[in-house]
Image (spheres, helix red, strand yellow):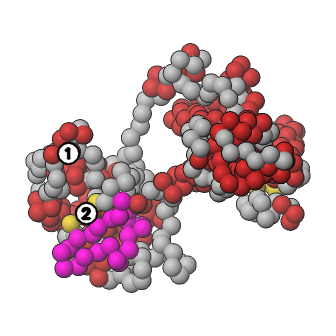
């Protein structure tokens, strides 16, 4: 077997353990990347070995950059100057640096022997500081960490990292963001996107948007200048066909609401935490991440209410979910901080377990998220509930800003009735 290559799912895959001397800075433990070379097409791994060697050289270059003293010093000096300039309102800069204006002025005094108390001196130091050669990968990892608190679903960060590692890092991961400008930047971005634009259009479109966001972040941070080579309007839209013309948008498959009662009867026969979590998700019409993160402290048993904090909601707005008797029964039979605990103490159930439960029950043509669509179809087609009421139950934004300003309530009483009605339907073996 060639060095650093393994066979997995029909492809040659580059795998290498992070050396001990770099583990403190690169805590992944093992680095894995697909070479995108099929084993059947390259049984002796001739082409795959070439790709793996390129990946290995890029990886070693990245590790060395992590401990490069000059680069580290440049980053530290640059952060000091940026923070000082921000505090003096010289230009819009992010609010994440730690140093103060006084520390920068002291540094200027030590270097020049003169006390600098004016804006011009601070700006001069800010512009004179050597800009560190931050690679795209370094910028992406820092961007993901900066955005992690804002993402309600922890899988967003994983999806970002996974898609960039698979489709972008092999091409531009070790390229300094300062070099991703003009024709060269566009050429490199196209090298990453073109191979998947026609075959994995949805993924490719998301990857393009992620590259654009990382490069915008790097520009605001001062690591690069110029236009964004990954921008769509007026740039890549002239080089690539519109995603909608390449592949039609496919919504997550939903189980027809007529099949829900029979499925629920079968689901209640499964004795597992995952089965109860899936049942609770269907009864509440909530998103997977909201259900798996549910805590006992969020439940008001007397009011029959589950209050999901804004930090865990997609719209970043607190959402109240009326609980039916069946949903409350699931709550009463759970134990621990999380309603649906995982195998490890103090941890919730893993995100993929509900999908695995559907597959275990022989449901291959529907997604967990699709049960929300089933609920929506049932409410409008069978029970003729108002669209506004159903959208509120699904925690969707209803109306424009003016309408939302005048709408203060969330129709709790009517939604209690709605969820009780949905429970009765789910408990009936035959549909209405």
Is residue 295 inside the magenta stretch? yes
Q: Quadrant of residue 189?
A: top right
The answer to whether 19 appears left or right of 242 in the picture is: right
**Residue lying at 42% horizontally and 70% vertically, measured from the top left:** 274
Residue occupying image coordinates x 59% and y 44%:
88
Q: Residue at x 47, y 56 (%)?
A: 153
Foreground residue among 385 and 79:
79
User: Would residue 164 be seen by someone viewing this image from the given angle?
Assistant: no
Residue with the mark numbered 2: 320
Crowding around mark 2 (Cα neighbors within 10 Å: few <14, some 14 to 19, many 20+) is some
Up/down of 222 relative to 151, above or below: above
Q: Position of residue 228 (x, y in %)?
A: 62, 27
| The stretch drawn in magenta includes residue 81 | no
Question: Could you say whether the residue bearing mark 1 is in a helix, strand or loop?
Answer: helix
Q: Decide if residue 408 is on the left or right side of residue 190.
A: left
Q: Position of residue 326 (x, y in %)?
A: 22, 73
Residue indicated by mark 1:
405
**Where the C terminus falls, by quadrant?**
bottom left
Image spot of residue 353 (x, y percent): 48, 65
Pair 2/1: label in front: 1
Residue reaching furthest to the top:
238
Image location (x, y in percent) of residue 89: 56, 41
Dot placed on the residue nearer the N-terminal end, 2 or 1? 2
Q: Residue at x 57, y 19 (%)?
A: 235
Q: Left or right: where does residue 47 sit relative to residue 214? A: right
As drawn, which residue projects farthest toward the front?
114
Q: Which residues are magenta?
A: 290-310
| Label 1 crowd bin: few (<14), some (14–19), many (20+), radius 10 Å | few
């Amino acid at each position: 077997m060639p060095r650093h290559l393994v066979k997995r799912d029909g492809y040659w895959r580059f795998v290498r353990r992070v050396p001990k001397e770099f583990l403190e800075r690169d805590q992944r433990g093992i680095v894995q990347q697909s070479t995108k070379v099929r084993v059947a097409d390259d049984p002796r791994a001739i082409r795959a070995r070439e790709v793996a060697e390129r990946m290995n050289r890029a990886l070693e270059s990245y590790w060395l950059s992590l401990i490069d003293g000059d680069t580290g010093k440049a980053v530290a000096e640059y952060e000091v100057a940026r923070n000082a300039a921000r505090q003096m309102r010289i230009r819009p800069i992010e609010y994440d640096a730690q140093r103060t204006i006084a520390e920068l002025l002291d540094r200027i005094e030590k270097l020049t022997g003169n006390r600098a108390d004016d804006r011009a001196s601070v700006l001069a130091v800010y512009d004179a500081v050597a800009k560190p050669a931050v690679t795209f990968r370094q910028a992406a990892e820092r961007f993901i960490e900066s955005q992690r608190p804002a993402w309600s679903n922890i899988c967003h960060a994983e999806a970002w990292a996974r898609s960039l590692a698979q489709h972008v890092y092999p091409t531009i991961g070790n390229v300094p963001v300062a070099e991703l400008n003009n024709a060269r930047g566009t050429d490199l971005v196209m090298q990453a996107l073109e191979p998947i634009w026609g075959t994995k259009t949805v993924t490719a479109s998301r990857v393009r948007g992620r590259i654009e966001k990382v490069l915008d972040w790097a520009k605001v941070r001062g690591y690069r200048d110029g236009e964004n080579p990954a921008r769509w309007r007026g740039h890549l839209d002239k080089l690539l066909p519109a995603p909608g013309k390449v592949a039609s948008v496919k919504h997550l498959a939903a189980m027809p609401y007529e099949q829900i009662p029979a499925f629920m009867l079968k689901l209640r026969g499964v004795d597992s935490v995952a089965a109860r979590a899936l049942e609770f998700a269907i009864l509440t019409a909530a998103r997977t991440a909201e259900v798996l993160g549910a805590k006992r402290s969020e439940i008001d048993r007397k009011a029959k209410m589950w209050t999901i904090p804004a930090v865990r909601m997609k719209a970043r707005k607190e959402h109240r979910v009326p609980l039916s008797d069946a949903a409350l029964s699931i709550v009463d039979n759970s134990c621990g901080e999380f309603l649906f605990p995982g195998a490890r103490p103090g941890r919730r159930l893993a995100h993929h377990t509900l999908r695995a439960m559907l597959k275990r029950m022989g449901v291959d043509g529907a997604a967990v998220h699709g049960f929300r669509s089933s609920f929506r179809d049932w409410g409008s087609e069978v029970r003729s509930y108002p669209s506004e009421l159903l959208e509120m139950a699904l925690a969707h934004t209803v109306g424009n800003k003016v309408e939302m300003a005048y709408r203060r309530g969330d129709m709790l009483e009517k939604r209690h009735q709605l969820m009780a009605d949905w429970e009765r339907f789910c408990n009936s073996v035959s549909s209405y």
